[in-house]
Image (cartoon, coloured by chain):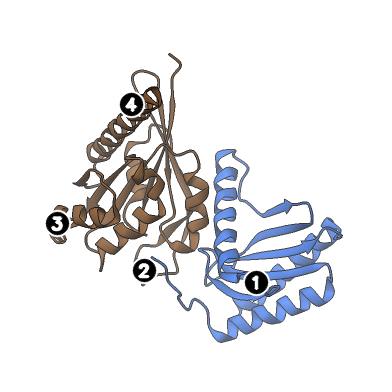
Chain colours: A brown, B blue
Amino acid sequence: MQPREYKLLFTGSMGVGKTTAIAAVSEIAPCSTDVANNDREGHAKATTTAALDYGEVFLENGDRLRLYGTPGQTRFDFMWKILGQGALGVIILVDNSRPDPLADLRDYARAFGDLLAASRAVVGIGRTESHSTPGIDDYHAAMDELGYAAPILSVDVRRRNDVLMLLDILFHQIEAAETTQAVNMELS
Amino acid sequence: MNAQVPVTSRTEAAICHMHIDALTSMQPEITGVLISTIDGFEIASKLLSDLSAAKLAAMTSSLLALSGAMCTETGSGACRDLVIDADTGRVLLMELSCRKQDLVLAVLCTDKVTLGQVLWAVRDCREALSRRLNVL
């Protein structure tokens, strides 16, 4: 079998750790498009992603994961559409320390609704150690209200193993979605 | 998810507007000019009414950031200008270095424009504006 390439997205609000997550697992020097951040009310960090982040992970069977990080701010939502083209799955990162993290989840879930509807998504909640609420059940309830279901777990994207776990779960989601799709095609 | 932050003083914005007016009056084939922060916030613009300065500012930021990444990846040094050649017009994007903060300049032209001539004029405008902002 020919090795496959999987285009996967990391999305979420500004400062949630998309660039960090990709840098934590990428086996090539990641490409970043960070520029100086003037929106210090949005986040105190010095730089922000203006176009994309890019990294790659190679699997033992020769498959390659191409990881794309989106900019967080809605003013860059045209990049979300561009980067979303051809994506096989999405990891939505949420920062539990932000003022309304459930609203953040809803915003990005709606923006990448096609992938969520196709069960090709996983949600990682960060900074839960310092901010225990909302809890995982609250996030599941928010997803239910939107009509979506996805694995939701607490992560620290600075830890390579946490990000690999997100990718592993997403990978299984994609495989399950493709199997279901193939079975449905055979039945129809 | 988004923000509107005041990133420059009124004086700086007025100086930018003055240079935009000078550039567009000198080059009639220039149909629009936008000056924004490097992370995509509009500072001053003169655009046709159907264009969104906020959206163009964000797109300029993305394109120049991506061009910079491409230059780094290919060992081409710092990205100076980006020229987009389209069916009915050209778009020039360039960074504008200032002491306080780096800005970006987007210039929209018709397809009748002579690229060298407009590049020269826009670079002149950039240098003059940079010098003026740096003495504030």
* Left or right: where A43 falls relative to B39: left
Label of residue A135 in the image: 3
Label of residue A179 in the image: 4
Label of residue B130 in the image: 1
Q: Quadrant of the N terminus of chain A?
A: top left
Say what secondary structure mark 3 lies in.
Answer: loop
- Residue type at mark 4? Thr
- Residue type at mark 2? Gly
Q: Quadrant of residue B113?
A: bottom right
In terms of depth relative to the viewer, which is nearer, A132 or B127? Answer: A132
Q: Nearer the viewer, mark 4 or mark 1?
A: 4
Q: Chain of mark 3?
A: A
Say what secondary structure mark 2 lies in.
Answer: loop
Q: Quadrant of residue A46?
A: bottom left
Report how many numbered discs are placed on residues in the image.
4
Q: Nearer the viewer, mark 4 or mark 3?
A: 4
Task: Check the image and report above or below for B71 versus A14.
Answer: above
Q: Nearer the viewer, mark 2 or mark 4?
A: 4
**Residue B136 percent across, percent down from the top left:** 58, 82
**Other-residue count near label 2 (Cα within 10 Å), few / some / many at <14 / 14–19 / ≥20:** some
**Residue A96 percent across, percent down from the top left:** 22, 59
- Residue type at mark 3? Gly
Q: CA distance from mark 3 to mark 2?
A: 23 Å
Q: Chain of mark 1?
A: B
Contact flag, marks 1 and 2 (Cβ < 8 Å): no
Q: CA distance from mark 4 to mark 1?
A: 58 Å
Whichever of callouts 4 and 3 sits on the residue coming sooner in the sequence is: 3
For residue A32, say whether it is visible. no
Whichever of callouts 2 and 4 sits on the residue coming sooner in the sequence is: 2
Contact flag, marks 3 and 1 (Cβ < 8 Å): no
Query: At 78% from the left edge and 52% from the top edge, which residue is drawn?
Result: B87
- Residue type at mark 1? Ser
